[in-house]
Amino acid sequence: MLPDMPPSQTAALAIVRGQRECNEKVLPWMNCRAFMDEFLEWNIRNHQAAQLLRAPFFFDRGTPECLAWMQLSGLALAPYRLAAPAQYRYAPTVFVAEP
């Protein structure tokens, strides 16, 4: 990654690491709803923090993917969650790369 193009921190891994360090239970295999809520909030915070940085900025994940995982997990999507992708827009050009 080029130094002037910072990536966002991967939300899911950071949440799992933090929860394990604190012996907490906001983990996808223990409390999927709480984990996904934290995942969404983390992605929103990443988006807000990126607004203060010089573009371009690379996101590993984002709010649309988070909502897709919530839906695939059978979790109800409240209206404020459904509004997140429109409220926190990404650039119209995206890059997809192999892991």
Image (cartoon, rainbow, N blue to C red):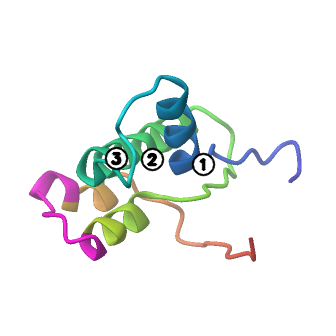
Q: Quadrant of residue 74?
A: bottom left
- The amino acid beneath tag 1 is Thr
| First reached walking from the N terminus: tag 2 or tag 1 | 1
Q: Identity of the amino acid at label 2?
A: Asn
Lower sequence index among marks 1 and 3:
1
Instruction: Give the labeled residue for mark 1.
Output: 10
Residue carrying label 3: 35
Type of amino acid at the residue the image marks with label 3? Phe
Residue at 48 percent across and 44 percent down: it is 47
Mark 1 and mark 3: Cα distance apart in space: 14 Å
Q: Nearer the viewer, mark 2 or mark 3?
A: 3
Is 7 left or right of 61, judged from the image as shown? right
**Mark closest to the chain's N terminus, 2 or 3:** 3
Q: Which residue in the rendered view is the most extreme toward the right?
A: 2
Tell me if mark 1 has few (under 14), some (14-19) or many (20+) residues whose alpha carbon lies within 10 angstroms of its own.
some
Instruction: Please tell me whether residue 65 is drawn above or below residue 46 in the rendered image.
Output: below
Horizontally, residue 62 falls left or right of residue 88, namely right
Which one is in front in this view, the residue at disc 1 or the one at disc 3? 3
Mark sitting on residue 43: 2
Q: Where residue 71 sits in the image (x, y, percent)?
A: 25, 72
Residue at the spot x=75%, y=44% of the render? Answer: 6
- Residue appearing at x 37%, y 52% in the figure: 88
Q: Which residues are magenta?
A: 71-81
Mark closer to the observer (2, 1): 1
Q: CA distance from mark 2 to mark 1?
A: 9 Å
Extreme-top residue of the structure = 22
